[in-house]
Image: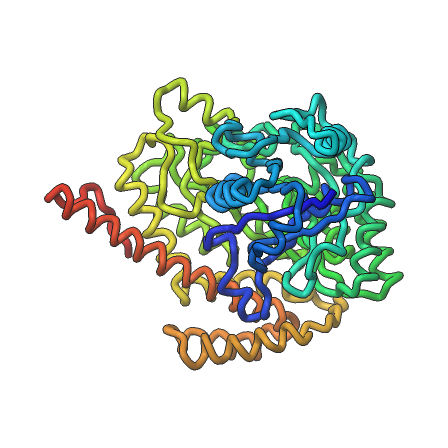
Amino acid sequence: MNVLLIYPQFPDTFWSFKHALKFLGKRAAQPPLGLMTVAALLPREWKKRLVDTNVEGLSERDLKWADVAMVSGMHIQRESLVAIVERCRAHGLRTVVGGPIASSLPAAELKADHIVIGEAESLIADLARDLEQHAAKAVYQAAERPQMSTSPLPDLSLIKMNRYSTMTVQYSRGCPFNCEFCDIIEIYGRRPRTKAIAQVLAELDQLYAAGWREAVFIVDDNFIGNKPRAKQLLVALAEWRRQYKTSFDFLTEASLNLADDPELMQMMKDAGFVSVFLGIETPDESGLIASNKLQNTRRSLLDSVATIQSYGIQVMGGFILGFDTDGEDIFDRMVEFIQKSGIPIAMVGLLQAMPGTQLFRRLWKEGRILDMGQGDNTGDNLNFLPHMDAARLVEGYRSVLKRIYSCEAYYERVKVYLNRTQPKLGERVSKQQWMTRANARAFVTSIVRQGVFGRQRWSYWKFLMTVATRYRHCVGAAMTLAVMGYHLQVMTRRLSKAMDAAVKAHEMQTGQPTESRVNPQ
């Protein structure tokens, strides 16, 4: 049987980093790890092709070749996914849809012949057998969450590695916390399940053997959900890097209680972790309590971030506006916190009530849900009725983005972060080779786009001069952040322009000025 595995496009958002990836000559940040894993679970005798529409087009030739199409994606990829399913069905292909989106949307909205709900490891054998016998059911749903030991090595042969900026490895699934707005705990559970250390090292061996030498993103939603096991893995990762004499850098996601464990932070540093994404959400503790983000309470958020940064680990932060507890001052408080935190990549979004979450169920009972949402919290769309006036909330959100992603504000945060990573007296500084071929290309492109033709050329050159004189120990990190800032600034301008157009359209349609606008200074 010929199976065509298809990954839908991501829209151009703050998360895509599309405009930064162009500096590197890359087309997407990461490959579709889920489909690569599914491919490895399918019968060996099946012929397989994988098309990631983020890096290449889906051709008529591929569709004619296939007997069945398997499509996987997240909520934010919904529009592209449905279009792909419809195109496949028009060619007479049987279609199977799985991934997180299948767990959060009604099957009818996905328009596929077969829906797979839950994790694939315990389902694929039955699905494959039924497809071969032309007896596949409409819906397959996992009866339980599988052990991670059943997850195979992903099939790297199906992707074009040079089109991605990072490779991906999954160590664990699930998170021990209970945030109201989170769909991860609904899909993967609150008891973290982990792979054996040998499994993770085998995946790294595979990447190394395939010639990969760049960053690896450990895609767990909370890498430290099980701290004792995470520490065991970190010891093995540090030894693995020494054995291969490689400068593999690792990135991951974690929870803010990472700052409570100096041993864990040092072990992450020793293992080569250079960046961690944290869900900080809001500087307003009442919002954290109301959303059950209790792990972020009873602490200084700023001190926690600074502690993690002091280990040379860059903090990327997720922030949310639109909690019921948000008051009139939340926009200024958010900007002030982000600037003091030294978090360059501060992803501020509007609260989304994702289907399947506790938040969605609560708001549905309160009659406040407007639609199923788009999965993109960095747009200007609300899928529920907020307590704050909606127009004021959206405009306040725009004001936050404009302020934190002005060149001056952004570079100021980068400098705060770089200052916190300054080597301590007597500390040995690792000499990593950051000027790779891809980074050299990015550096030259950055000089041209940001330094020659950029809108804020003076701020850019002032920043580079500061890096050259004060932060020579981390030139690579500084240049990477400068390039990432370019993407964030482009997206801020585009979102602001789109929101202006929407306001004008509303005013022309109603003949009334839009109310409740805030000062976007």
Q: Quadrant of the C terminus?
A: bottom left
In the image shown, does 57 or 263 lie closer to the viewer? 57
Residue 474 x/y as whole percent: 63, 70
- The coloring applied to the image is rainbow
In this picture, residue 412 sits left or right of residue 261: left
* Residue 280 makes an appearance in the image: no
Residue drawn at (62%, 77%) of the image: 440
Residue drawn at (31%, 54%) of the image: 498
In this picture, residue 408 sits left or right of residue 203: left
Residue found farthest to the left: 511
In this picture, residue 247 sits left or right of residue 276: right
Q: Quadrant of the N terminus?
A: top right
Residue drawn at (36%, 51%) of the image: 400
Residue 349 x/y as whole percent: 43, 45
Residue drawn at (77%, 44%) of the image: 46
* Residue 200 makes an appearance in the image: yes
Residue 378 x/y as whole percent: 43, 47
Residue found farthest to the top: 365
Q: Total label count?
A: 0
In this picture, residue 400 sits left or right of residue 41: left
In the image shown, does 492 or 63 lie closer to the viewer? 63
Residue 502 x/y as whole percent: 25, 49
**Is 293 rendered above or below residue 375?**
above
Residue 506 occupies quadrant: top left
In the image shown, does 218 or 254 lie closer to the viewer? 218
